Image (cartoon, coloured by chain):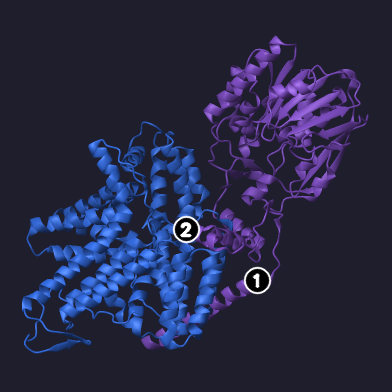
Amino acid sequence: MKSKQNRERAMGDALLGIMFLICVVVLNCAGLLKKDKKISESENRSLAERPEFTIEGVVRGSFGDNLEAYLSDQFIFRDGFRTIHTGLKLAGGSRLQNNIFYGKNGQLMKNIDKPDREVLSGTVEAINSLAEYVKGTDEKAIYMMLVPDVAAIYPELLPSYAQIEDEETYFQEVRAGLAENVTWIDGISVMRKYKKEKIYYKTDHHWTTRGAYHMFEETAETFELDAEKETDYDIYPIATDFNGVLSGNSGFAAHEREEIDVYLPKVQTDVIVNYVDEQKKKSSLYDVNKLAAKDKYGVFLGGNSSLIDIRTTAESDRSILIIKDSFANCYIPFLVPYYREIVVVDPRYYAGTVAEVLEDYRIDDILFLYSGNTFLTDNHIAEFMTI
Amino acid sequence: MVFSSFTFIFIFLLTSLVVYHIVPYRFKNYFLLIISLLFYAWGEPVYIILMVLSILFNYLCGQYIAMLRLVTPVKKSGVIPEIEIIDVEKEYTVRGFQTQVKEKRNLQKRAKMSLSAAITFNLLILGFFKYFDFVIRNVNHLSGGSLHFRSISLPLGISFYTFQAISYLVDVYRGDVKAQKKFINFALYIAMFPQLIAGPIVRYVDIERQLMKRKLSIVKFGEGARYFITGLAKKVIIANQMGEIFGAVNMAILSGEAVPVALAWIGAMAFTLQIYFDFGGYSDMAIGLGKMFGFDFKENFHYPYTAVSITDFWRKWHISLGTWFREYVYIPLGGNRKGRARQIFNLMVVWFLTGLWHGAEWNFVVWGLYYGIILIFEKFLFDRLLHRLPAFAQHLYVMVIVIIGWVFFFSNDLNGAIGYLHGMFSLHKGGLFDRSVLFTLMNHRILWIVSILCCTEIPNTFMMRQGYYKWRKLVTDMGYIALFLVSVSYLIANTYNPFIYFRF
């Protein structure tokens, strides 16, 4: 009896051996036959190419690493395998992946980490020194607009037991530390007021155009914008299959598709958008080429650039300098009818300093527009601000 | 090259297997040696020279000692036997060597001295590469000086192949085995890729016959596949994820954050699971790979977390290392045959060395001595008490001791270990419990349950029993293939793929 059982077991092992071998061979051959892909749509990055074989590379180990990356990136059914992996993790209870929460209602939320104290105080100091500088020279208005991250506005959508830092306290700290002539704009109360509407994307960390619009609405007075120029907007969905950065980075909600809206004013204002470093000029605030890529949010101003100079045909003589991260990109169109010139700087990409910008352009107002997460952790702002 | 990588599974292993099975029988060992050297060179292109030299050196020493030893295989008694000397007046040949000896004693003495010299040389090499930095650092610390030194990088697998070489030499001296006269076979014993980088530490006596004659069958190959798939899954699915959990908690504690006691424990438990499934998984893969090429290695882990005492635990954890230290340190020192005081001393020496073997840092030594002391206590004090405890108390006792032990193991140094222990026992900083603890548990709830279950024999016994029935066997086989594909998916998605025991 025992030996018969052992024989049965042996047959089972033999079968497994064959199946395993076939599996490995098939996966291998399929991978060899398949053509290499250049970009991964779902992961929003370029995929590794076949590495060159050099003796030096082998000795240094770089060939090995590159080969491994190549095999992994070009593996057959890579996206399928990733879906299996994410599915299993979700089934296993995972609600936090790569620092991104998979919240209720399928809302993805970036985790709010503790800010780097040094960086933060450095940034605030830098802003204050700028404030000091402009107080002395000529009357410029400085505004600070911090937009809260989605997790701060919708904590109830966080997965059970998840804990995040309280962004509001940090915002208050920043507010308290800023100089007197910096006008603080309370982003949190605005976003909270319109919570019931879709003011954030589900799969991306940005606010929606609607969210930006409400912020614009509520703060128009603060900016002393000419009330007469108020206009109505036509709302068009410029994309309906947007799947954002948070989804790509975490693997969650990979099949969710969202709308991106543009608010086109009924009363048109023409613009010339000058990408100064790239030496390109465009006549629209929207770059529809970006809609072909995965990160469709880039349709706004073509994504992040070091320095953009927007000249408008608006009946105004005011100009504004916006120091920002990507959140400002869908907000800027709302300002266009009110300013003759809008200079846009992203300190992460701009190599110069604020002094240079103030010299090169005639600026009336200065606006800092940042999302909480970026502002609390980015050290480029302070660097940019050295006078 | 790491076993859990695409390069290994889909390029190296596949090609090796195919060619190995095509190559005629008498060339198989040569081929296996060549690919093993390639495998090693891939990860260690410079120090492969060192390993080759070590193999040459130990091969020659083995031959020399055997020649002196006049090998007549004696039954292993665990005690170094007196050498049988034949009538010296007569000429005699030992495997083609012709010697004439004047004095009986010379042979034995020379053999022993040669053995000592060879072992010392091996240990010096190991000591130099592994402990040079450590020694200099401590000398600086003690003398207040600042000798400048260049950090020496640790050649891959040196702890493992050195120990294998030493075990071979001693076994030859003792007469437990005949010296391997074919260089190729000896080289293969040391350098065979399944066990070269991270064990198990294979004793020559266990593999002697297999080197020269082994049967290849699809059944054994399938068995190997089973071990390999299980090991891969353990490493890629469980160990890597537990590693992430532990990493997050550890980073929080190291950066001085206020971490609740419960979370510190969960971090330590995550590491406890990580190291078992990482190392155990790797051993499984090594055993599986061995089987695919026709070798049977002894198992290295036998469900250690089901142990009922620390003594039991060390009979189930890293079995090959425990065996090595017992055979080649404890017993030669006298074991338990020279009185209780000497036995305690012997045990402490063994555990001091065991700790030190794991890493060139004091926290590893403390880890080793920690277990040494507990084992002595168990042996002489609470042995009977432990037996009478109910099962759950025994398991609880073992796990608490083991988890605390790992704190010394995973910390960078003694200060770090004490800092972490502080987090585990002091309520001052973060209190006992908070929601982050629950979140960490819930975020991986299935993983916790599955890993704890896989620490026991239950899943394996279940799968093995299905093998007896025709249809269920097919289902379980497909289950293993599915497990393999899931592991592949985790490999694709995970960029985080460390291997802890690689520091050896």
Residue A326, placed above or below residue A359: below
When asked about the image quadrant of residue A355, the answer is top right
The purple-coloured chain is labelled A
Mark number, residue B275:
none
A95 vs B114, left or right, is right
Q: Secondary structure at mark 1?
A: helix
* Residue B166 in the image: above or below residue A325: below
Residue located 29% across and 65% down the image: B163
Q: Residues within 10 Å of mark 1 (few under 14, many from 20)?
A: some
Is residue B485 found left or right of B499 in the rendered image? right
Residue type, label 1 = Leu
Residue B499 screen position, x and y as percent = 44, 57
Q: Who is closer to the viewer here, B216 or B109?
A: B109
- A326 lies above or below B315: above
Q: From the viewer's perspective, is B201 left or right of A251?
A: left
In the displayed structure, A305 sits above or below B384; it is: above
Res B238 label: 2
Amino acid carrying label 2: it is Ile
- Say which colour chain B has: blue
Residue located at (32% from left, 39% from top): B415
Residue labelled with disc 1: A32
Q: Chain of mark 2?
A: B
